[in-house]
Image (tube, coloured by chain):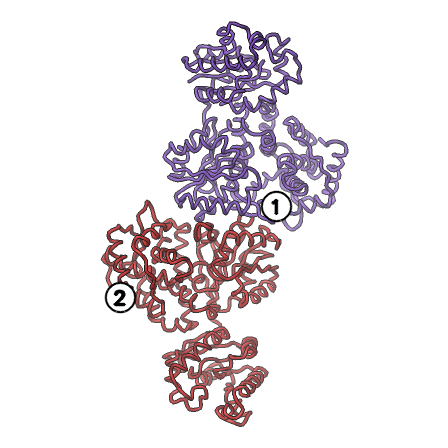
Chain colours: A purple, B red
């Protein structure tokens, strides 16, 4: 146990929860705002009024440094403590930072009339929301842990924090594919990348393939972890974005492996999202006819889907993902806490795959996602870890059954037939992958109603879940002919009949060829839906 | 049975063997020179003297056309019949062409004083050899079959021809690697590529990857065979030579696959030598994460070695063969008759791998190669088929034991440690691969004497065999330091100790790390050898 810093928007309940948490952990409690008032000899509104915000921030930084020199304690911080880089770095280096998340609405409701809260003196929900949005990513990236406090009493919040700061168990999921490997899931396992790579690959030398964005966030930490484990690590950084997933870029990455002195006993560590995983995976598969690969996925999509199963690939001039290899990793290291820094658009791409997964899994998993949706929206640590764990378990199970996509694995294509088609027609990169797949799931639900007589309830639940996560509808116009041509290009088709994964009810899916007449009818239903402003 | 044309240098015994063969096959016999003399009413020297060679060639062409309009027969042709393209095409299209091979020395001995042989009237061994060399490739590429007549009586020659024109059995060798596959070996199986591809892959669409040289020789035949079998075939032709084995070229080939409409159920047919096999194989492994591959090797090296075992690869900017995949073919179709068109330099590259193989195999195989060496030099069909068959059987066995080169397969590296090093040091393409490996086997033999106390006899037999096939010595100068650095770069090394495959006696090999002192001593022995004009 070390120092605990509680951060979050005003009204998140940091002081109340802090007192209770200090009691539960048998640590002293420090309220940073109270310490400032005491040392300056003025109330916070007075400091703001007389000396200005800068003076207050100086005092706050000084008190924070003071708290860090004292024995371990629970420290409740002011809402703006994260505004200074130095404060964020200091907190992360000398304790565990817990972000108490709350929706803007609940924060405002808790503050009441706002007396004594300088920044909210001209109280309005709009202003609270705009401050919250601006600070949101600062809170998330400062935090080691995120706890949703919405609708929870302070005692309930503390009950959530205690096991987390004690260290949530790291879980392991085995995949029976390739030589067999383990997905290690846990908050903080990013710090153990070096030891895990050493243990699972015996490599003395690795190339760390990552992109410029992820490198800025986690590159140094992972390099340090590798070096500490006695592994010589060479960074190979590609530009962030799909354009790096090219045949030419793969050639440059392979040349970089050779220049870094990699041999058959070396390994590749892929740190990033789907693009990095696909690119680095293909390069690991192709270097000296294949060297060990470790995935360290940093996006939700990569954690719940692409890091497990051995699919790797790059784009050709002729089309997306046309070149690649099945190359199973030697290990997957999944740290859900890295998802706190994920931009909203990428987060949503992953959420759509989660929705897809639970509807393939079954009733229980759909119900749990419906129940946890609001917490997941706030990226609450317990809820996110549970969600990632459940999805990986399912993916591992499917892949273990069907490594080369000859049977059951095809179910993972749910929503992707129309999804790929509209991504393609709109021009890749125009419609986000998740948004396109979400549309594909809505479309396939309607098909299931027509073809399999599936209950309307199934499609409604899919639509409602996607809506509750804020997945936007697609507003492009496509002709039926274009859609059919694009869907025919799907790799899953056989002999010019378009095949869909159809979900009758949670966990009950099938792969069906769909005849032209039905397809025309449902395409018309779907296209008309837009003109009416949405279908679901 | 159809028409049989006997071709070959004067003195090869075409007329004598032709009479006996016609008897054995119960066919009429036509001596084309005799027919010309009869129709013109002059002896051949008289025709040459009075009307000139052109008039003789006209008469010869006319009589050949006449023979082709008659019922089936054994036709003995004059030595120069192959000089006209039209004659060669006519013979190949309306019968089976058998080249009776003979060394220049024996041809001259048989001709005796040369009376009645116009082109040899100023008799000299040198002139005979120069005519022979000029015509050699015409004979070989005209022939369906090649029979060595040196040292054989006409009756023995006929006994060799009879089973060949009746159709030598096609043999099949199974490889237990990947999903398991069969190597089909037989003279003429090139005509069955279509049926075999259909049977082994079920593909309805293929890309035929080949190079410009091979395409000119066999491209049309293979495309016809595929089309006849109901397979849509798209030709993908790369420039002949190692430069086509690049990452960039692989990207272009993959784009061509996509443009040709290949999907997961399509196949790639690799028609060519090692470069085409490695490139097409890697592209088959990488297209849509792997589609079926059929090797149709057209060089000796590819037939006896690289087409079996699933190694594929391309060169990177950083080095040769650094990218690739293990991708086992669905079938290998090996027609030894295509080797008749192989340029001498490429033939020698393959012969070195044959020598390597028999010394890994055992006493019996070495003895057979020693016995057959002179026939193999003349590319005698029986001897070549036996040699290819024996080498494929060994390679198939080794690969079935050790698909991923974790153990026994390493033996195939015999001669390659020094071989790769000197190829590399001299600049790739300067020293032919086979010549470098031959040097490596000589070097490794000396190492075996020093390290394993191997009998001197082993190295002598290796040197004698290599010499009898005309493998030249390397005359470049290398420093000991450069050699050691280059050998250390070998993929087979572990922890900076150079490892060699050492052969104590035929069939008795081991992989040994060799210490620095011994290495220096043998490098010195080898380097001094050059100054003395050769070691063996």
The residue sitting at the bottom extreme is: B41
**Chain for disc number 1:** A
How far separated are the C-alphas under marks 2 and 1?
Answer: 67 Å
Q: In this rendering, is residue A166 above or below A225? A: above
Q: In this rendering, is residue A453 above or below B381? A: above
Q: Residue A498's quadrant in the figure? A: top right
The residue sitting at the front extreme is: A51
Q: Whole-percent x and y of residue B518?
A: 24, 53
Secondary structure state at the residue bearing disc 2: loop
The mark found on residue B532 in the picture is 2
| Contact between labelled residues 1 and 2, with CB atoms less than 8 Å apart | no
Assign the C terminus of chain B to one quadrant of the image. Answer: bottom left
Q: Whole-percent x and y of residue A111?
A: 61, 11
* Residue drawn where x is 65% and y is 30% of the image: A471
The residue sitting at the top extreme is: A41
**Chain for disc number 2:** B
**Disc 2 residue crowd, few under 14, some 14–19, many 20+, Cα 10 Å:** few
Q: Whole-percent x and y of residue A55?
A: 53, 13
In this rendering, would A533 be left or right of A495? right
Q: Are marks 2 and 1 on the same chain?
A: no
- Judging by the rendered image, the residue that carries numbered circle 1 is A492
Q: Whole-percent x and y of residue A120?
A: 62, 13
**Disc 1 residue crowd, few under 14, some 14–19, many 20+, Cα 10 Å:** some
Secondary structure state at the residue bearing disc 1: loop
* Residue drawn where x is 28% and y is 67% of the image: B533
Q: In this rendering, is residue A115 above or below A127? A: above
- The foreground one among A287 and B354 is A287
């Amino acid at each position: 146990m070390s120092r605990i810093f509680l951060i979050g928007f005003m009204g998140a309940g940091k002081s109340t929860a802090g007192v209770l948490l200090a009691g539960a952990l048998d640590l002293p409690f420090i309220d940073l705002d109270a310490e400032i008032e005491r040392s300056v000899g003025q109330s916070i509104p007075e400091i703001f009024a007389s000396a200005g915000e800068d003076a207050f921030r100086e005092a706050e930084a000084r008190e924070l440094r003071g708290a860090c020199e004292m024995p371990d304690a629970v420290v409740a911080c002011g809402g703006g403590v994260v505004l200074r880089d130095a404060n964020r770095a200091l907190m992360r280096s000398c304790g565990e930072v817990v972000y108490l998340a709350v929706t803007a609405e609940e924060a405002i409701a808790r503050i009441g009339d706002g007396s004594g809260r300088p920044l909210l003196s001209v109280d309005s929900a709009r202003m609270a929301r705009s401050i919250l949005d601006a600070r949101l990513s600062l809170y998330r990236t400062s935090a080691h842990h995120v706890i949703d406090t919405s609708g929870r009493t302070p005692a309930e919040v503390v009950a959530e924090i205690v096991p987390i700061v004690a260290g949530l168990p790291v879980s392991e999921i085995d995949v029976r594919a390739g030589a067999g490997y383990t997905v290690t899931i846990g908050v903080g396992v990013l710090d153990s990348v070096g030891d895990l790579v050493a243990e699972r690959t015996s490599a003395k030398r690795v190339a760390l393939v990552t992109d410029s964005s992820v490198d800025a966030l986690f590159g140094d930490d992972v390099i340090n972890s590798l070096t500490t484990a006695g592994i010589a690590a060479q960074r190979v950084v590609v530009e962030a974005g799909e354009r790096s997933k090219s045949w030419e870029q793969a050639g440059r990455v392979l040349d970089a492996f050779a220049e870094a002195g990699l041999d058959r006993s070396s390994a590749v560590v892929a740190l990033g999202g789907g693009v990095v995983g696909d690119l680095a995976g293909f390069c690991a598969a192709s270097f000296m006819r294949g060297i060990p690969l470790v995935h360290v996925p940093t996006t939700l999509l990569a954690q719940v889907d692409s890091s497990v199963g051995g699919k790797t690939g790059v784009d050709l001039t002729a089309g997306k993902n046309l070149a690649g290899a099945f190359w199973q990793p030697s290990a997957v290291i999944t740290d859900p806490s890295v998802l706190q820094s994920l931009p909203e658009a990428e987060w949503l791409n992953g959420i759509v795959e989660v929705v897809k997964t639970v509807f393939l899994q079954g009733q229980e998993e759909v119900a749990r996602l419906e129940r946890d949706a609001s917490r997941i929206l706030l990226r609450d640590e317990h809820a996110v870890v549970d969600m990632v764990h459940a999805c990986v378990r399912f993916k591992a199970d499917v892949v273990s059954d069907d490594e080369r996509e000859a049977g059951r694995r095809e179910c993972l294509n749910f929503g992707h037939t129309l999804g790929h088609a509209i991504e393609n027609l709109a021009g890749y990169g125009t419609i986000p992958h998740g948004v396109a797949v979400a549309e594909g799931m809505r479309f396939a639900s309607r098909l299931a109603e027509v073809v399999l007589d599936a209950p309307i309830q199934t499609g409604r639940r899919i639509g409602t879940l996607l809506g509750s996560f804020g997945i936007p509808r697609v507003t492009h116009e496509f002709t039926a002919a274009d859609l059919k041509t694009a869907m025919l290009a799907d790799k899953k088709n056989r002999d010019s009949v378009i095949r869909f994964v159809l979900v009758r009810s949670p966990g009950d899916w099938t792969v069906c060829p769909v005849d032209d007449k039905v397809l025309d009818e449902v395409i018309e239903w779907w296209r008309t839906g837009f003109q009416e402003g949405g279908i679901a």
